[in-house]
Amino acid sequence: MLARVELSDDERVQLREEALRRTIESLGDSVSILAHEIKNPKTAVHLALCAVASRLGEDEKAVLEDLVARLDRLELRLRRALNLTGALEVASDRCDAAELLGAVANGVSGAAVDVAPGCPEVAGDAALLTEALGALVDNAARAGSVKVRAGAGGAGRVRLEVDDDGPGIPEALKDTAFQPFFTTDDERSGLGLAIAKRIVEAHGGTIGLGDAPGGGTRAWVELPSA
């Protein structure tokens, strides 16, 4: 009879993380194949729908425009899944913090943007950072009103914060929230924060969740300055 091997807590965590890594790598292969198979026909259908819509009445045009929007959302979801599972190519841009925050807060009604005077530029990939910050703002908007701010962080860093005035997040979930597929909303994939974390860490940055002043949740990101 084989002796039972007792594992330490650290060893159990390591085994779980290794199993999760293998699962994500396997998922990445599947998503890459799926994205490749969908991209070309999606582009052809998109162009065809746009061409047909221009020749129809308003009611029919609205239906086709809705189909185009659904295709765009499908492509976005595939790109997000690839950002979680595939290799990230990070461009070396000089990103203005006000432009980054303005881009992600623009579609959120009543969102307030505050950029400290003399805030340094961020070193990184503008498109990827916009996606990461967009996930944080989207989460905040579902909880309540949104405030985003930027200013100098630690030495050579820029700190970006996204606050909401919702019910807050339990302490036990502040780290768990960044795990892939974790969600408290049945209508969401649970990939947004996981992808945001991966993008931030690919830039040499750090990300976390805390308590916003006066209640609610604060998501924060620190990134290297340009």
Image: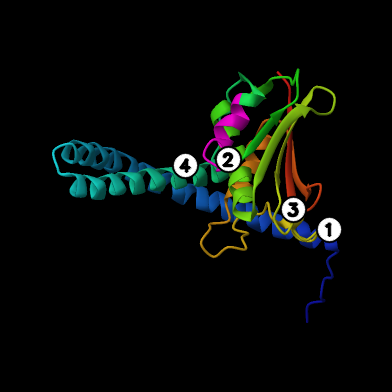
Q: Which residue is mark 2?
A: 134
Horizontal and vertical percent position of residue 8: 86, 64
Asked if residue 98 can be seen in this view, the reply is: yes
* Region in magenta: 99-109
Horizontal and vertical percent position of residue 209: 75, 48
> Tags 2 and 3 in contact by the CB under 8 Å rule?
no
Disc on the earlier residue, 3 or 1: 1
Q: Residue at x 62, y 63 (%)?
A: 184
Residue found at the very far bottom of the displayed protein: 1
Q: Residue at x 58, y 40 (%)?
A: 134
Q: How many C-alpha atoms fall within 10 Å of the one at disc 2: few (<14), some, or many (≥20)?
A: many
The three-letter code of the residue at mark 1 reads Asp
Q: Which residue is mark 4?
A: 79
- Front tag of 2 and 4: 2
The three-letter code of the residue at mark 4 reads Arg
- Front tag of 2 and 1: 2
Horizontal and vertical percent position of residue 39: 34, 40
- Front tag of 3 and 1: 3
Numbered circle sitting on residue 10: 1
Q: Which residue is mark 3?
A: 216
Taking the image as shown, residue 14 lies to the left or right of residue 179, namely right
